Amino acid sequence: MNIYDSANKLEQDLRETPEVADLKLAFEAVKANDLAYKLFDKVQNKQFELQQKQMQGQEITDDDVEEMHKLSDQLQNFTEITNLMEKEKKVDSMMQELNKIISKPIAEIYQG
């Protein structure tokens, strides 16, 4: 079997996991709440802006950090977003476990 066939099968299997299904439903709930979605989008854009600054070697200012904290604090006011964050954690945990499994042959080479 081709390794890419396995990867494509894994991708299909991931789509059918409860964790991904729950994440999809949680994101749909955020999108259904206009205020929550606008704030979510604003936070995403700010994170992207800060990543761009970092990649370009620009300093992230105290004002940038403070703004990000304020936005993050506002996220907590929306149950849809806190639920989405919980679902993201579950998917992230699953992805970390999968990465450990997939990376095992490489890790074994260096562990000798």
Image (cartoon, rainbow, N blue to C red):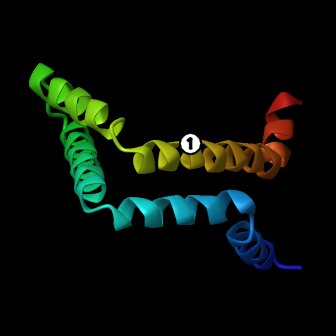
Residue placed most toward the observer, 50 or 66: 66
In-image side of 98 versus 32 (left or right): right
Residue of label 1: 86
Q: Quadrant of the N terminus?
A: bottom right
In-image side of 54 versus 107 (left or right): left
Q: Residue at x 68, y 50 (%)?
A: 95
In-image side of 63 versus 110 (left or right): left
Q: Which residue is drawn at 13% across and 20% down?
A: 62
Observer able to see residue 38: yes
Residue placed most toward the observer, 91 or 31: 31
Q: In which quarter of the image is the C terminus?
A: top right
Instruction: Specify the amino acid type for callout 1.
Output: Glu
Q: To which quarter of the image does residue 106 belong?
A: top right
Q: How many marks?
A: 1
Question: x%, y% of residue 68?
Answer: 22, 32
Per the image, label 1 sits on a secondary structure element best described as helix
Task: In the rendered view, tell whether residue 4 sits above or below residue 103.
Answer: below
Q: To which quarter of the image does residue 78 belong?
A: top left
Residue placed most toward the observer, 34 or 58: 34
Point out the residue furthest to the top here.
Answer: 62
In-image side of 111 versus 30 (left or right): right
Q: Residue at x 79, y 38 (%)?
A: 107
Characterize the local packing of mark 1: few (<14), some (14-19) or many (20 or more) Cα atoms within 10 angstroms: some
Task: In the rendered view, tell whether residue 53 sits above or below residue 18.
Answer: above
